[in-house]
Image (spheres, coloured by chain):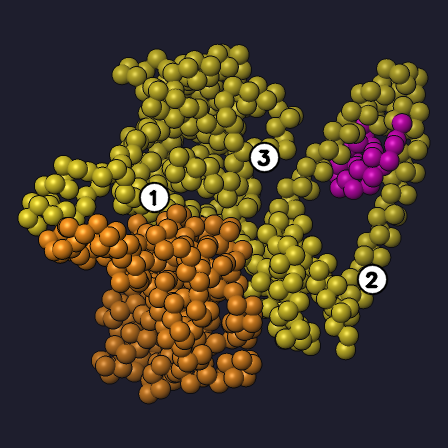
Chain colours: A yellow, B orange
Amino acid sequence: MDNSIYLSKIAEFIRLLSEEGFSVGTKEAEDACKVLEMTGFEDRETVRAALKAICAKSQAELSVFDRTFDHFFVSAEQKLANLKKALKEQQELEERRRQAEEELARDRQFLHPDDEMIGGYAELPEEEKERLRKLLGKFRDNAERNPKLYEGFIRSVFMRSIMEQQLMMEDSELGVQELDPEIGLLFRDISQINDSEMPRAVAMIQRVTRQINGELSAKKKASAASKGALDFKRTIRKGLETGGSFMRLKYKRRRSKRRRLVLLCDVSGSMIQFSEFALRFIKAMSDVSESSQTFLFSEDMVEVDPFALQDMDQFVSYVRKTGLYGKGTDLGTALEKLCAAKPAVLGPQTTLLIVSDAKTVKLDSAQQSLLRANQLAGDVVWLNPIPQRKWSRLKSVQTMSLLCRMVPCSTLSELARECRKLALG
Amino acid sequence: MTAETLKKKLDETGYIYDDTLITTLLVALKLGRPLLIEGAAGVGKTEVAKVMAYALGRELVRLQCYEGLDESKAIYEWNYQKQLLSIQVGMGGKAEKDGADTAELTRSLFSEDYLLERPLLKSIRSEKPVVLLIDEIDKADEEFEAFLLELLSELQVSIPEIGTIKARSVPFVVLTSNRARPLSEALRRRCAYLYIKYPDIEKEVAIIKAKMPNADDRLALAVAQAVHDLRENENILKKPSIAETLDWVAALEALGEPDLTPEVLQKTAGFILKNEEDIAELGTAAGSCGCTEHSDGTVCEGHGAPGHHCGHHHH
């Protein structure tokens, strides 16, 4: 068998992995070729294991590797089945488009259906199409009489409906992608984690925080162990034990400056689950937790008793007791109170961490208060559970992100990364 | 080395392997790349280095990483005390009068006589190739990873006072990590990668039988099933390792317990679970099962939380 045909395939496969975000290049392609010349191509699983050893470098990459491998190195039967499936899907899509085009053609006078609208309308669920049909039925007579007056309005309702559907499909894709359930949960939108998955999510948070604590401890030990300048006093004193010879050299230790963390968590309606996750992360990080102060807010703000958060499983019932549960969001009032607190909560050594989706009432007053908090605190970081791709559509998020460092934290993985940054400085 | 030879050698050590492990080891050997092994604690990562030392007929040089480990403990260190003594001896003698001897003494202070070899240097200066195990690399700090990069990619060590020391032989390097912290991309890129999961029930039984050939088959299966269930239980903080499974079987054999009843399970829980919360959780899980005796081997499903089995009645 001529292996050179397969070797070009390997190069192509490495390129695909690179597109998937793997840190692979020419060296890996060369290594893969060397190894596969030794193992041969007869056994698919051997080829998989050999390429995996060379190209995948972490547990998270293993499942992506398997998926890419299965898509690339398909068996002949699988190839045929995929082809048939793709053909069928293509035919169905064309049929749906044709029907949509026919349906919309009737009202082309004021609807002006273009490719985007036809394609989007074809993918809408039947109940949504029915809603739009009813809308058209209601306004058709008027629109036909005065197309200029109505075309903008009707078109905007159509396009909004299509956009919402596309966003929902984007979100659902996040779930489809996961092959490894353990890793998948880390990359899922937090709002989509349901009650039955909570224990797994909590266990995962514990595991990640253990990792962060390990890093923190290693960093602390390393900085303590790292040899700074020679400590003459201690070296001379120690030298007295050995008749004045400096047999043991002593070095100065570095002191680390600790930053205080003030948490302001939004617990209104939909934010409570995200705030719970964020608090679980931060409370589990021993060093950060020791020097932090937590405040919860919705329409009002209360400081949290640190002992009350020791058992995070009771978090929701604790929030209920505070009377903040189920209310709206007023960030301005919360920040105002925080800035005016006596003794002062915010100072140059403080990092203010706001955990909120920025959907607040009285945006102007919130803006003013955030500016004031920015002046008082050393740093202000905003953890936002809304995915970044949706920020451009939300005025409050756009405004607030200009005033402080806003970080998208829609998944546990993003939340973990930001908490790690906070802890390690 | 071929796959068959390697399999034969691993069989001799009693190490239970799968085809992925064999292929990965061969890939690392063929490419001369270090092998980075990740996985939970106690899945047999360190054991891979040991069995490879046996399979290749090489000496095993081990470097146990810990917080604050630096190059003086891992690569080399100057024997400061010996240098100081030599200076004092030299100063007291004729060197005091002779300038040339003083210069010679200074030069000799940074020669190989005063060099203390640590595991990494030892592994590359050895005449015969060795297997170098860098255990729990995640415990060492990031600066140490940077030292490793030169050694792993160039197979050389730079000592400012002497110069570059090149490897006399190429060691087979195995790095293990429990993922206490993420390793740098640079280090990962230089390694072949293997992730070892906890073994499934069948493999765990095989491990028990390989390590303890006299263990009762039924007991081995019951223990493997119970350990598997404990690992699946998300409320158990410290998942039992393979070594603990073996300890548990040994304890049960020593006590002469042929069956893993809830009472025996509670009595011997200390061999498999190592903290109070986990033992309490085991009590809850076994208690929620509500069964006291299943001598007939019946399977009771549908009670207790999922994944919380008492472990004695699933054979």
Q: Residue A10 carries which label?
A: none
- Give the residue type at disc 1: Lys
The Cα atoms of the two marked residues, 2 and 1, are separated by: 56 Å
- Local crowd at mark 3 within 10 Å, few (<14), some, or many (≥20)? some
Secondary element under disc 1, as helix, strand or loop, is helix
> Disc 2 marks which residue?
A84
C-beta proximity under 8 Å, tags 2 and 1: no
Q: Mark 1 lies on which chain?
A: A
Residue at 27% in and 45% down:
A225
Check the residue under mark 2 and report the chain it is in: A
Taking the magenta stretch, the answer to whether it contains residue A312 is no
Q: What element carries label 2?
A: helix
Foreground: disc 3 or disc 1: 1
On screen, residue A255 versus residue A76, left or right, reads left
Q: Name the residue under label 1.
A: A219
Residue B94, by quadrant, is bottom left
Crowd class of label 1 (few under 14; some 14 to 19; many from 20; radius 10 Å): some
User: In front here: A344 or B53?
Assistant: B53
Picture residue at 25% right of the left edge, 77% below the top? B251
Could you tell me how many numbered marks the image carries?
A: 3
Can you see residue A237? yes
To which residue does mark 3 refer?
A: A387
Q: Quadrant of the N terminus of chain A?
A: bottom right
Going 40% across and 74% down the picture, which residue do you hit?
A: B127
Mark 2: few/some/many CA within 10 Å (<14, 14-19, 20+): few
Residue at screen point 84% across, 27% down = A136
**Magenta residues (range):** A112-135
Q: In this view, does A175 lie above or below B278?
A: above
